[in-house]
Amino acid sequence: PEAITVQELANRMAEKGADLVKAMFKMGMMVTVNQTIDQDTAELLVTEFGHNIERVSESDIDLDTSYDVDADETLKTRPPVVTIMGHVDHGKTSLLDALRGTDVVRGEAGGITQHMGAYQIKTKGGDLVTFLDTPGHAAFTQMRMRGANVTDIVVLVVAADDGIMPQTVEAINHTKAAGVPMIVAINKIDKPEANAQKVRERLLEHEIVVEDMSGDVQDVEVSAKTGAGLDELIEKILLQAELLELKANPDRTADATVIEAKLDKGKGPLATVLVRRGTLKVGDIFVVGTESGRVRAMHDDKGRQIKEAPPALPVEVLGLGGVPMAGDMLSVVESEQRAREVALYRHEQATAKRTAMAPASLDTMFSALQ
Ligand code: GTP
Ligand code: MG
């Protein structure tokens, strides 16, 4: 019971095996994902990734779908999930709004746009791109720490009239830590005092070498105000997505990540979720965090009723028993009884944790693995 492979530990923490290998390399240990590590090292890694050790039970293990890896032949290309980051007032929200304005579906439907934490656009070429409304850097990190690393690509917004600022640097660091590729959008180029070249030069100090400076980080000059460069930005996102070969199995029970959740006076608990794999369907029974539920209805960001949500589509879900937390994983299960059982178990765990405030030992985790 004293040993665990790096991959098994990664699965338990819902992290990537490669990220653990990287972290260990930084600690001076050279390992592969299949290698066994001792309890001390495992404990160190768990702490390093900001996880608690006690979140393991028989029920959780059964529900831990990170074990059942989808076979290659079941995987299909899925849209990229893009997060926009950058310094205050550099134009993140404006850029998101402008990009949303390029959505051909939205143009056709002309429907009411819901205020959701995520939305998907269809480009002129017919490609789909999902954008996460900038959650703030702290939320980004918190989601990541909780194993909800949903972002495939970060667009770093830098205002050309203001240049590299403290939160720009913060965003660069978060992106590097997450190991997510970055595209630099140099915004506000419509302003007379804009100096895009200076931005590129100053990025060098943070080891970001953009294409224009013969590096490999894509950069693009944009204006959220005039719409200049938006098509080029989307092109670069699609190019990056192609390189990443993003895939998911759409033909299975769904796993989804909670992006945001709230209690609506009329509709009850609502959650915006992003489907990671599988297809979420109306009628599906699920567990999310310490809550169970059944999908009563789903809406997309255009307010349209959706019967089935494929990978990377953000949808608002009705039919939750309570309000989950951002970063919680929603997993579809086979029966209501099973959903209630797991939810109840997790409730008890959470209550016990609040009362005792003493984390169980790593032994529990290892014995649970046998
Ligand atoms: P926070 O959410 O507060 O961090 O700001 P933000 O990064 O979301 O910036 P926001 O989109 O709110 O834009 C800040 C200001 O810059 C607003 O007054 C925008 O109108 C303006 N702005 C954004 N993009 C452009 C642009 O391309 N050109 C010009 N001229 N102004 C812009
Ligand atoms: Mg904003």
Image (cartoon, rainbow, N blue to C red):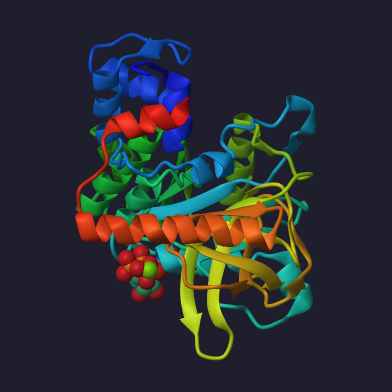
Quadrant occupied by the N terminus: top left
Q: Position of residue 51 (x, y in %)?
A: 31, 41
Q: Is residue 190 left or right of residue 235?
A: left
Instruction: Look at the picture and state if 153 lies above or below 70.
Output: below
Query: Looking at this rendering, what residue extends furthest in the bottom direction?
Result: 266
Q: Ligand 2 sits in which quadrant?
A: bottom left
Which residue shows up at 33% across the image and 51% down it? 142
Q: Is residue 268 visible?
A: yes
Number of callouts: 0
Q: Is residue 189 left or right of residue 231?
A: left
Q: Is residue 161 visible?
A: no
Q: Position of residue 274 (x, y in %)?
A: 59, 56
**Image quadrant of residue 67?**
top right
Q: Position of residue 171 (x, y in %)?
A: 31, 47
**Image quadrant of residue 77?**
top right
- Which one is nearer the viewer's eye here, 156 or 15? 15
Instruction: Look at the picture and state if 152 lies above or below 301.
Output: above
Which residue shows up at 28% across the image and 55% down it? 353
**Image quadrant of residue 48?**
top left
Instruction: Look at the picture and state if 130 lies above or below 6.
Output: below
Q: Is residue 343 left or right of residue 319?
A: left
Which residue shows up at 51% across the image and 90% down it? 265
- Which one is nearer the viewer's eye here, 198 or 46? 46
- Which one is nearer the viewer's eye here, 146 or 170? 146
